[in-house]
Each structure stands twice: as C-alpha cells, then as structure tokens.
Amino acid sequence: MCLAMNEDKAGPGKYAASTSNRNFQGRQGPGARTLLMSPIMAAAAAVHGRVVDVRQLARALR
C-alpha cells in the first residue's frame, strides 16, 4: 500500500507497517494504526508475518 488513495487501505483498528517518514493520522486508511519502522524491520515483519525484533534475529543467525 502506498498512501491509501485507492482501495489498498488498512481498515479501522488494523495495523500497517510503514517505512515512510511522511506519516500522519489516516495516511494508511481511516482509523488505521501505523507502525513506523526501518526497512530491515519491515522486511523481517513481512517474512515472519508479524513484527519481530531484528536484534534477536541477528543473534539467532550467529
């Protein structure tokens, strides 16, 4: 999703992960909540299907 100008929006009360620094209330959809994160955090969340701590992932990979 980019900026909720089309039908690709997070619903009310739903969470979206974003790496954009241009966030404001309603940016990803009316009533949606945005978790601002680094690109590596967003990639890890996409792979795992949930927000994860990349520091723990890095330790596990050593």
Image (spheres, rainbow, N blue to C red):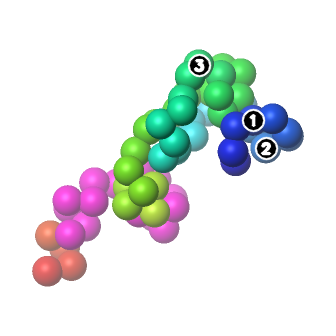
Question: How far apart are the two marked residues, 3 and 1, measured between alpha carbons?
Answer: 12 Å
Tell whether position 51 is magenta: yes
Along the viewing direction, whichever of 57 and 36 lies nearer the viewer: 36
Q: Which mark is residue 25?
A: 3
The crowd level at tag 3 (other Cα within 10 Å; few <14, some 14-19, many 20+) is: few
Residue where numbered disc 1 is placed? 4
Residue where numbered disc 2 is placed? 8
Q: Relative to residue 3, is residue 53 drawn left or right?
A: left
- In the rendered image, which quarter is residue 24 located in? top right
Count of labels shown? 3
Identify residue type, mark 1: Ala
- What's drawn in magenta, residue-wise? 44-58
**Is residue 18 something one can see in this rendering?**
yes
Question: How far apart are the two marked residues, 3 and 2, measured between alpha carbons?
Answer: 16 Å
**Is residue 13 something one can see in this rendering?**
no
Outermost residue to the bottom: 62
Identify residue type, mark 3: Gln
Task: Give the x, y percent position of residue 62.
Answer: 14, 80
Outermost residue to the right: 7
Contact between marks 1 and 2 (CB within 8 A): the answer is yes
